[in-house]
Image: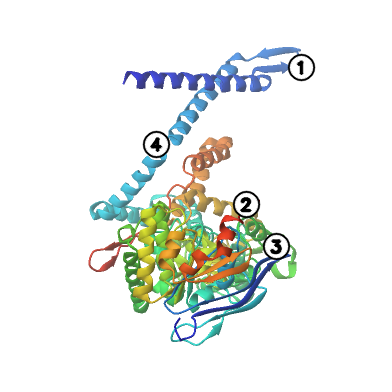
Amino acid sequence: MTASMPVLDIRELTMDFGGLRALDNISIQVNRGEIVALIGPNGAGKTTFFNCITGMYEPTKGDMIINPPGKKMQRINRLKPNVVTEHGLARTFQNIRLFQKMTVLENVMVARHCRTRSGIAGAIFRNESTRREEREMVEFSYQMLETVGLGRYVNELAQELPYGAQRRLEIARAMATEPFLLLLDEPAAGMNPKETSELDQLITKIRDVKGVAILLIEHDMKLVMSISERIYVLDYGQMIAQGTPREISDNPDVIKAYLGEAFDA
Amino acid sequence: MDIDLRQILKRSAGEIGKSSVVALWFMFLTFPIMVMKVNPLDKTILWRWMNMAYVGIGTFSLSFIWRFLMERKEMGATKDEAETWQKRAGKYIRSDKRIYVPCMIVLIIFALYFPFLFSSYQTSIMITALMYVMLGLGLNIVVGLAGLLDLGYVAFYAVGAYFYALTNHHFGLGFWGALPLAGCMAATFGILLGFPVLRLRGDYLAIVTLGFGEIIRLILENWNEFSYGPSGIAGISRPSTFGIQLTLQQHTIYLYYIMIVLVLFTILVVSRLRNSRIGRAWIALREDEVACQAMGIDKTTTKLTAFALGATWAGFVGCILAAKTTFINPASFTFMESAMILSIVVLGGMGSIVGVVVGAFFLILLPEYLRAFSQYRMLAFGASMVLIMVFRPQGIISGIRQRYEFHKEPAEEESL
């Protein structure tokens, strides 16, 4: 583990929905440039956890602290989702949430919103600075699409893309906000083995080239085991295990959570 | 080939059967009113069998045409064809300057000579149509781009109109001074409405905006000291001509040209907004509010700018309405107006500028030119609206997104 402070430090996070405790004292750290996986059976609270970090839910208890490289440490409790994104946490969604009727390029350009400044007057008069910003935005977004391998789809509508490409577009869109931590919610869901292995390479490439830390929720164990450096396991809102892929795959609690308890006669 | 033909024959036999049933049913339904005519004095019944035949033939052919069109639509042929046809035509017209430029020149010359070719009455109708083009384009920002269903748009129209009427009445403010201020005033009201409805979407938003529209109208109707109630305000100045005396007819022509300039200005601004950082944020908000926020867009400011900018155009047009009619009262700002403007946007094509322009001309000019059909006017008008919505649910012209070409350098290509 690196000596520097973790870029994401979640301490004793608890989330209650009425009487239901969806997350119970969860603590997770993600270090700079690390790929961390969050796994667990359906309904374990993984997506709830993501929604808490990204400001969509307000957690009942606990501290969420970010430590962006080159910026000062900050608590992100009670911040609005768009402010969290501005601070450098970007996410994708389990059920793809692209802007269906916009082109692929525009989907990525929308993500540049929080990194650009031109306003209404700029839009109407199209002064020099607005045009420059627009050119840079187009160029940046196009490069991002090239990175994920969608360069030939720029002018297609997002809804017309094949499924695997839509997933990659979600990643490109999230990356366009220039995050220091990328949160991927089941990026391989519904993908075939070939697409999954391409995704594996893409995630590793993003980490290596952009130096972005990645926290992913995933059910595809092959993918999780091959790319993640550390794994956290959730079950019924409780953290039941954490460790390296090898430790996790040998952990009896994890096997029990996934397969159920062995029946002894 | 043989099998194909047999299948077609078989299917059309089925269609004929179904249409016959429809015709019989209508003949039965209309039997008492169309066929029997009781003469209570002579105590006789006049049997008008010819009417029954008319009803039968009429409903049979209508039903048959309807079924034929629906089948084509279901087979996807119509939609795909229309879509590609539109795409191809759009591409062709835009790419080939030899067609695009002369078309535009003819259109511009026609628009410029219009008041001299037609009567003052026709010019006046055209001014109204152009006003609705502006209203439609303004509402298009709110409904078409930002996806916020606003049923109280007429409130901002009223704000603009009353702003000019009142400032003109009390302070003698001229049209040219009032026009931008009316826009600002309406924008302020847009933000005022925007704040309470920030959390609402879809049907809930529609109900609240509907209520807002009614509130404004009721205030204007009942606050006599402020707005002179239902009797309204008369004697509002026409657009000033910087000292030149004009007859009523010349005033109409003058206003027509003002409208042409303002509509062009609106189209320019809206088309630029649509393909800007703000415009993309609006569309993203329409497409997926959760994802939009997760991508770092502030929902609050984005919604408020949409409401404010949409309302601005209503304010402008309100000011023009007051100057055109020189008299306003709350009766001009009923829910029917909001519904009409919304129909322009939906029928023309949400998010499409050309669509809204076509929609406005269609919905405003059609009832005027259908006056020839006298009492069937509104029937024909309603029927054409139903037909368009059934066969082109995306509107007459659907919105086209900007395309970008990447070769070496990214170059922008304008699309309208």
Q: Foreground: B247 or A95?
A: A95
The residue tagged with tag 3: helix, strand or loop?
A: helix
Q: Where residue B91 sits: x, y (%)?
A: 30, 52
Gap in angstroms between the C-alphas marked 4 and 3: 47 Å
Let me know if residue B272 appears in the view.
Answer: no
User: Is residue B77 positioned above or below A216 on the image?
Assistant: above
Q: Amino acid at mark 2?
A: Met
Identify residue for label 3.
B215
Q: A146 or B349, which is in the foreground?
A: A146
Q: Is residue B305 above or below residue A9?
A: above
Q: Give how far apart the Cα atoms at labels 3 and 1 are.
A: 52 Å
Q: What is the spatial separation of the Cα atoms under label 1 and label 2, in whole angstroms?
A: 42 Å
Confirm or deny contact between disc 1 and disc 4 (CB under 8 A). no
Q: Nearer the viewer's eye, disc 1 or disc 2?
A: 2
Q: Secondary structure at mark 4?
A: helix
What label sits on residue B336 in the rendered view?
A: 2
- Rounded to the nearest angstrom, the CA distance separating label 1 from label 4 is 55 Å
Mark toward the viewer: 3 or 1? 3
The residue singled out by tag 1 in the image is B40
Q: Nearer the viewer, mark 1 or mark 4?
A: 4
Q: Amino acid at mark 4?
A: Ala
Q: Residue at x 43, y 57 (%)?
A: B353
